[in-house]
Amino acid sequence: MESAASSPRAALPTPGASRKRRRSQSPPPAGEDPNEPALARPRFGDNLDLILSLQGKELSLERKIELAFNFVTTESNRSSHGHRADNIKLLRMVSFIGNWVQSILILPENSKRVSEPFDPVLDYRCWVILRFCIEKKPSVSISLNLLKPLGRVAKDGLSRVQIGASFDDCESSLLFERVLDCISFLFSSNTRAFFNAGVDLWTSCVIEAINLVQKVSPNEKSGCAVLQNLGNCLLEQFSSFLRFHANPKNLFRPFVDKILDPLLELLVLLNSQANSIEHKQAGTTLKIAEEILSNGLFHPQHLSGYFGLKNLNKAPIAKDVRGSYHRHLFERFKGIKAESKAVLLAGFGYLLQLFVSRARNQSTYIAPRGTSFRNPQKSSEASEEPQHHGESIFEVFMQFMEPLVSECKSYSQKDFSDLGGTKLVEVHCMLKSINEILRTVTEEKIYVPTEDTSEGSYLQFLQDIYRVLILIAEKLYDFWVSAVHLEDTNIKKMLPLMFVEIVVAVGHFVEIEYKVMGGDLAKLWSMLFALAAINASSKGIKPCFLLTSKISSLSSQVIHTFSELRQVAHSICMLCNTVRTFRAVTGPDVVPRPFSVASLSSHKCLESLATLLSSQTLRDAICTSINSMPEGQSSRCIEELTVDLTDTLKWMNNCGEDVDLESQGEFLSISRKSVFYQKAELLGRHLSELYTSVLDSITVTSSNTALVAISVERLVNAIRPKLSQLVRNDSVSSSEFICSVIGNNLSKKQCAKWQKIPSLSWMFVFFFRIYTSCRSLYRQSVGLMPPDLAIEATELVGNSFTVCCGKEWTNASNVIAEGYFAWIVESPGSLLDVIETLSQSIPKNHSGFAMLVYVLHMMALQRLDDLNRQINAFDYLLEDNTQQFDTEDRGNTAVFKESCCLEAARLTNFMMNYVGILSSGENGHFQCFEISSSWDLSMCSLDEGSFHIATWRLLCENIDIWSLHASKKDLKSFFSNLMKFSFVQKRSCKDEENSGNQYSHREITLRTISVELLCDTIIYDRKVLLKNLASSFCHALKKSVSSFVTRADEDALLDISPDLMEILNKLNNMKLVGGTYPDEDGVDKYRICENLLNFLSTVPGFHSNSKSFLRLITHILHLERLLLLALLSRYELCNPIELIRLFICCRRAMQNLVSKFGKEYLESKQYSAFSKLIGNSDSLIWLLRSVQEIIHLSHKIFEEHTDEKKNTLFSLVDKTSEIFSTLANMNSKFCLLGPKKRIECSLEHSASESDTSEHDGQTFDTLENSALEYVKIMAEQLEKTTTGIPVTAKDRNCVIKLENCYDNVCWDTLLCTMSCIGGFLWGIVSAVESTIKDYPIASSEERKVMHQYASNFSRFIAKFETFIDICLHVLFMENKDCGSVDMISARLPQELDCENGFLNIDAVMDGWTMHQLKNNELQSDGPSSIPSESHNFGLFTIQCMKRSLLENLLNGEGPFVAFTLRELYTVSAAIVKLKVLLSFPRDVCRQECNPSQHMSLDPMVGTAYIALQKIADMSNWPDMFSLVWIDGILRYLEVLGTLPEHKLSKELYAQIVNAHVRAIGKCIVLQGKGASLPTHEIGTNTKTLNLRNTSDSVITKNIMDRQNRLNSLKSRLRLSMRKFVNVASNMHLSATLQVIERALVGVNQYSHSIYEVKTGTSNGGIVSSDVAAGIDCLYLLLESVPGNKHVLKRTVPGLVGALFNIVLHLQSPLIFYTEKLPSLYPDFHPDAGAIVLMCVEVITAFVGRHTFQIDACHVSQCLHLPVTLFKGFKHLAGRTVSHSSEKSGDQTVGQPLDTEEYIFDRQFSVDMYAACCKLLCTVLRHQQREVGRCVAVLEDSVNILLSCLESADPKMVRMAGHFSWNKEEALKCASFFRRIFEEMRQQREILGKHSIHFLAGYISMFSGQGPFQTGITREIDEALRPGVYSLIDICEESDFQQLHTYLGEGPCRTTLANLVNDYKLHFQYQGKI
């Protein structure tokens, strides 16, 4: 090597000559000479030449870079190929090249070389060279000036983004990727590389990086992600530079002067993008920017100076005070304000948040990983922050706010009309910045009233800000009022946004301290009302909608705040007062008030007021506040309401001079402008709503009932003088009522015109609503009063009969009510008279009349309720067995009852009149209403458009009250409307929006109200209502069917049975082409008919008489006939998919009707009609043939094998099969039980049994014969379909080879045939099972009768079985080259004849059928002839199965083939099941049944085994439809497992069990976190929680459907395996245990040296799917097998040990997380958390079994398990976390790592906590001796679980992202933990002496001395108290003394005393009950 290297130099005389010659001829690049590989060249000479070339000036800079790059590439290749080099020489070379490349990168910009067009900084090769040098020699000297080229790279990237350049070219993308790679490696290997750089160097670089990040952050173009990562890398290093700088003080001023402005602008931008899905990296960049600001402005060494700013401001400026440089920051704030940099103003709030965060968490700061820099002296200086700095933080807040407040004050003095749009934008940004600062004050609790100064300066400062904001609001409002008519849309859009900020700011002040508002709450309400009014006047502008929601939110916030202060009544009364003064009149003598709406339209003002008061948030706030009010304040609240109501009446009484009756009645537009009209509408619409909301929300209890009643009486006394003028008995004097309300005496002429005043209806509404609410509240109070007080109270109201008892009922005067208005006057007029008078007299041309009519409906319902009570009382007194009255009194009582019934009928008739209006489609006196309109349930928004919705809701919700008195005509009209609104009306947009919302938070429509009534049980419990519903439904269905009729003469035929034979003949003769088809005009008829049919299919309570049933079935058959005719005739001209979907609805509805008809009591006539309709052969053929025709057509209509096609057609097949099953089941039950016995059983509990006499013996025989004949007809018709296998061959007569049969089969027809046969057989099986279960067969005669019935169908069953066997062998078996040939295969010919579209198998069928009949177990006389292989068969025929076919089916190919195979297995399962059920002893049957005698048992079991194996081996998501057809195989295995004795070998049995285990494991893997044990899936207490993850994971409908099907498949697998285990012998059970034990240990099925329980990965441990399945199957085994079996007992220690081994391998914090996004591909391993939870639950099951003996070491492990799982639980991240994948190790430096996002699974955490608590309780209960030895371990687990219930620190949750349960979750967990303490009480002997230790732990936690020192919330403490009292109960007196001494002075000792005192009061047994 050396000689080779020196040979070039030997030819050179001098070094100078050498250099000279090198200038003339440069060396070729490496690898240029093909004859000499680069790696084999001599290197020493090349290195020297390279050095000389780089040092020389002859070569261009670009050529030098090329040479250096080639050298770097060559060395990298040598290293990758394993060539070893001389490290010393290489390091010297690397050092030289590193220095050289840095020198060309940091060339000054004014250099001559830079003037060249080539720029080395922008050449990616330079950065590759530099990275190579750093990698090979980490100690290479890095120049600090390297920051300059980095800044230039950032600047170049910015320029590329600005001009919109593309990054697709290789050069552009490589540059920034290599620079990022280089500096990332540099910073990771040398974190302090630029720590000594000057501020100017960093400033120039960082500014360019900030500009780059700001530009690329919102950009989604390719390449921008790399630029953003580059900027983030530079900024992150700058943050570390600031944090660990030796003298941060020197950096403060340059940072503020040069970096603060661009960084603030970036901060504002990133905060707006942080929560956006589109900007995924914004969150990372935001954290870096916040760190830079925190380290630059709020470094630990700076903090003490901020806390001394108050003293600084007081000191002279010239005095050099320590920390005075902090003033520079606030001076810069003032400069930003002066420069009008609007965007930067919004960053002030973020800066304050960063300051508070740094100040409160200074001690918890952790240096970046890899940083060894420490400065103990500086850290000690930073700790000089005062201990109590809450006061100082507020002072800093004042410093932040002062420039903004001063600016606000200046704007409050200006006229906004003189400001332009730009200034308005600045004001908006200023307000937004104030909001950000106030939000920080709110979240961080900066202001605490108890920490305020003695002068209250902090509160005064907040009040100053509030007053300034209100002044600005007044100015802005005046400007907005004047700008309504302006054309500048920008200003119109800006004003609502500014008011949004003001409203939000006021909300912050309300939350910070309510005293900030002062005592003028009315001004706040006035501002909100005025803003709502001006906002309503500016509708159409997008920001107005945002302002509306903010106003509503602030209103509710004010109500809630005063509710917490126990002053909710005050806030509501102030709200009412503001409503009264809302439209105050202004004049020349009236001083204008702020927020006046006098210049706005009165209509808009009232509309805005209605919008605000009817908002759901405000209504909920009022109702919630009143409900949560202490019960002692209820009466006081009513008293305050009474005072306010009195003021309201006085306010209304003062408007008498404003009433001009002449103008009131002229025009509505004129009257609405009058003050009287506005006051009247405010009174009736808004004030009445507020008053009634309070009254309806008051909670009445037994303790406050008397006070509430007295307060309500006073309230009624306030309205009695005026209301009595209206309801007197002598006359209904409305004119006197008007005079009393308005305070003005009317002349006779005016009295004659009072009806013309349209605003009078509002006054009626007000008084009637107040009276109805008072009446309802008073009745609640009376119901809770003592008897004496109740009687006295009811006498006042006039309905004392409600509280009468005993002999008081004999006095008729007590039963007679005095009238609805008896509370107002002594002799009131009837409610009906008032209704009639007002209905006829009040004008009907404005909105007030609609609300009045609605209130009258409410009053009528209240009166009807009273009348119903009276009528029930009269009915009781008039009963025959009550001899309380003589004849005269009885006659009077009858008269009283008749008068009550008459009044009730008239009131009902009044309400039904409006139902008639709904039927006509016109709103009568109002206008034509929109049937699709909606209503928000608020009376404020009730108008003509929503009146019909409100009235209909009132009637539907109270149908039980008025339906008793409605006429037949009215009921018919009501149910007709019910049908129309429920099914005919379209689903509106509101229904779609509100379908997932709660009832109180949505708008309702006629459709939603009607559907809810149909779902209510009351309509089905009353025969009258149900009869009308059925009649209306039949009429609606007939009308819907008639829309499909194309000929006029067919309408009359819809009520009679359809002639199905005619259409069947046409189908056979193919004469349907050219027929009629439904027109396209009636698009809605599909939807209407589908809605009607879906109702029949889904509503379980729809039962009616048999006549209605038969009518419905008749209409459905007609509809099916019409639909099929339309499809077969011209389907391309109609909507074929809709027709097919509608046909499926018909089948589904028919199946439901037939099923319900069979459950009803059947008379002979009804049964005959039913059999004639659907029991004849034509109907059966129709059911089967129609499905076949539709499936044939579907191939032309649908695309190939789409999900829609599968769902549609297979649903149709299943429903038809269910109809056959239902018919067979119904009639078979009838025959097996006997009609006479069945009728007697159905009438057993009836009151009268006279109906049984109508049936004689002949009738019974007729019914039984009819049922038997019907079943035979079904069997015969199905037998005809098994004459051959259908094929698709076009030649009607041909020959098909056996191996080609599969390709020629018509799977559609075969599927339908198999499905109907299976339905028929399972119907018989169900009938036999239910008969044996419900009516056990006691005598042998009854058994013979059942056997005789089944023998009637033995021939059919034998033929079905033969047909199944032949289909299996012909279609699914490998008949060619098969080594083993069974009996059927031997008899099959090699070719089959095809005749008329069917394969001729008659010869095989007849031969095998006769063979079966000779050996038939149901009627054979000869001995049993069972093939020998059936006794103990194996898997020898598996090789003959078509394995490729099963793989294709599992992949979703050939869905019809798959479903045919499913039905084949289903039929076989039914045949085997039927044989099992009819296995009678020989004394009953001449031959004992042998269910395992089945020709195709071997291949069917083999096929099932292969299918399960294929499922377990799938590496991708299985096709969801394959999970459906696998159900048929599992059904067969389930039946096979129920055989009395398995005929399976031990090896075969073990293989089948292993296949089940592996398939279950695959399901667990696919389920992920949702995998659980069977009992957990059925339901636990934790499932009652409505939990959700902290981050919304993407859960789509497809994912939900996939999980549901997986759950169904796993349940089927469990059931199948359970059947095998239940009847297993000891040999088979031992094989099962061996399979499960091997799975738990993790033995690989292919290699015993490989174990599948692993640990040590970054994600924690992993296990295989077989291990997970072993856990699941072990639990199943524990449930199924008795524990006293020795074969199970001896394996318990090993099984339990394996479970603990799995838990210890898998435990890690990640078990509580789940993937945020569902993966496209399934995992190879099950979810670790789900497996751990399953293990804990199985261990609990082992511990809880007395028959199992658990080892002592396992008991201690059980007690320690909660510590293992929940240690550090409270420190887990509750938000989204990222975890690097295992492949991240292959990533290069600087390249983003592959990470997965996880979210905390809240539901799982609750489940795991509950499981651990159950485990401890079970151990305490069943392992007392071992627990006594491990008390210390138990104490550790209890303390860990208790610490999880400690209150979360809001600061840690918000800032550190720590997890925190919400209240509902924590309460659920506390209820489980409480049981541990309660169980300790039961183990007093063992744990009594240790109870004080557990009690001490709870007391310490409660007193705030736990890990977080936050204590336990009140709700959690209440949930835990019963358990704590249980601990105290087992403590001795000496224990309390010891505990008292141990706790010492402080809160713990106080807590102990309180606990003991509460224990004695609430828990300790005192010997009394």
Image (cartoon, rainbow, N blue to C red):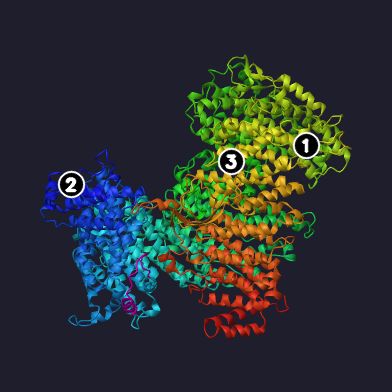
- Look at the numbered disc 1 and give the secondary structure of its residue: loop
Residue 1382 drawn at (x, y percent): 72, 28
Q: Which residue does the numbered mark 2 point to in the structure image?
A: 63
For residue 604, say whether it is visible: yes
- Is the residue 1517 above or below the residue 300 in the image? above
Query: With 56 as the anchor, is 1767 left or right in this view?
Result: right
Q: Nearer the viewer, residue 99 or 374?
A: 99
- Residue 808: quarter of image: bottom right
Please name the amino acid that badge 3 sits on. Ile
Q: Which residue does the numbered mark 1 point to in the structure image?
A: 1431
- Is the residue 1149 above or below the residue 75 in the image? above
- Neighbourhood count class around disc 2 (C-alpha, 10 Å): few under 14, some 14–19, many 20 upward: some
For residue 705, say whether it is visible: no
- Residue 366: quarter of image: bottom left
Residue segment shown in magenta: 365-385
Residue 53 drawn at (x, y percent): 17, 50
Instruction: Look at 64% across and 66% down and name the residue there.
Output: 1816
First in sequence: mark 3 or mark 1?
1
Q: Nearer the viewer, residue 625 or 688?
A: 625
Q: Quadrant of the C terminus?
A: bottom right
Question: What is the CA distance from the residue labelled 1 to the residue labelled 2?
Answer: 88 Å
- Look at the numbered disc 2 and give the secondary structure of its residue: helix
Q: Which residue does the numbered mark 3 point to in the structure image?
A: 1511
Please name the amino acid that badge 1 sits on. His
- Look at the numbered disc 3 and give the secondary structure of its residue: helix
Residue 1187 drawn at (x, y percent): 61, 28
Q: Of the residues tagged 3 and 2, which is closer to the observer?
A: 2
Q: Nearer the viewer, residue 613 or 1101?
A: 1101
Question: What is the CA distance from the residue labelled 3 to the residue labelled 2?
Answer: 63 Å
